[in-house]
Image (tube, rainbow, N blue to C red):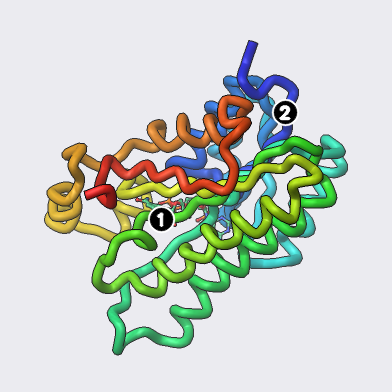
Amino acid sequence: MGKLDGKVAVITGGTTGMALAGAKLFVDEGAHVFITGRRQEALDEAVKQIGRNVTGVQGDAADLDDLDRLYDTVKREKGSLDVLWASAGGGEPAPLGEITEAQFDTWFGLNARGTLFTVQKALPLFNDGGSIFMTGSNASLGAFPGWSVYAGSKAVQQAWARVWLNELKDRRIRVNVLTPGQVATAKQEELFDEDTKRQFESLIPRGRMGRPDEIATAALFLASDDSSYVNGMELVVDGGTTAI
Ligand SMILES: NC(=O)c1ccc[n+]([C@@H]2O[C@H](COP(=O)([O-])OP(=O)(O)OC[C@H]3O[C@@H](n4cnc5c(N)ncnc54)[C@H](OP(=O)(O)O)[C@@H]3O)[C@@H](O)[C@H]2O)c1
């Protein structure tokens, strides 16, 4: 018996990294999973890797028409939804003094505005007792120079989780934030050279970056009844970086 038997889950930004690892695990635990991403080729490859009980829907989580298309597909194929993991997000370094309007609009457009509408547009399909969680970042808990736009655009989630769980309490829908630290993903490879990665690792009490499967297991906890009494919490999975 799987922890997500018969459940329907949506994972935005699910074609690589920790969200792909989560999508595989959710399917292994009995769910049907809808994953999204902007690149059709990466989406097709992820669907192939997952292999069963998965639907790929191409789209940008910052684009409200794409979100409508996503939920139209969920409604047509499955009728309703039990789990939403709003994981699509990103950022780039920009120290105060050099932040451009375009950087602000891009990252708040995806991490804040996109996440809010990803959740809001899912609500008509949500079954009572469902689980919503969003991928935050421990950048919003630490004070990493150069990352204020990213940190700010993710910090909203902690406030939203608390307000939304209160608004959704009659439907018993839980809302939480899953907050990773440094995790070895494609985005990390793109952003950081080996020296920078070593510097980051020196700040992590656990002594190394996280692996995507270590975020996936935390996501399964939040998605499943294992966390049935966990509501409005931020689950920080960062090897202890922001605990010290
Ligand atoms: N990696 C880390 O160390 C780390 C740490 C803390 C928090 N996070 C957060 O964890 C999440 C995943 O991060 P990651 O490092 O795995 O990122 P990533 O490698 O850049 O992207 C992962 C997935 O998201 C998709 N994606 C990116 N932008 C999207 C958009 N606008 N709409 C829909 N899909 C989109 C990507 O596919 P396409 O490019 O094809 O769209 C890919 O499938 C993000 O919210 C990130 O902020 C990451």
Identify the secondary structure beneath mark 1. loop
> What residue appears at the point 72 percent right and 28 percent down from the top-left corner?
7
Tell me if label 1 and label 2 are in contact, CB under 8 Å. no
Residue 175 at x, y percent in the picture: 62, 47
Horizontal relation, residue 207 to residue 139: left or right: left
Residue 131 at x, y percent in the picture: 66, 40
Question: Dividing the picture into quarters, in which one does residue 5 lie?
Answer: top right
Vertical placement of residue 68 versus 47, above or below: below
> What residue appears at the point 47 percent right and 43 percent down from the top-left corner?
16
> What residue appears at the point 18 percent right and 42 percent down from the top-left corner?
205
Horizontal relation, residue 181 to residue 179: left or right: left
Residue 44 seen: yes
Residue 41 seen: no
The residue wearing badge 1 is 137
Identify the secondary structure beneath mark 2. loop
The residue wearing badge 2 is 7
> What residue appears at the point 54 percent right and 30 percent down from the top-left corner?
220
Q: Earlier in the sequence, mark 1 or mark 2?
A: 2
Q: Amino acid at mark 2?
A: Lys
Is the residue marked 1 within 8 Å of ligand 1, measured from its CB? yes
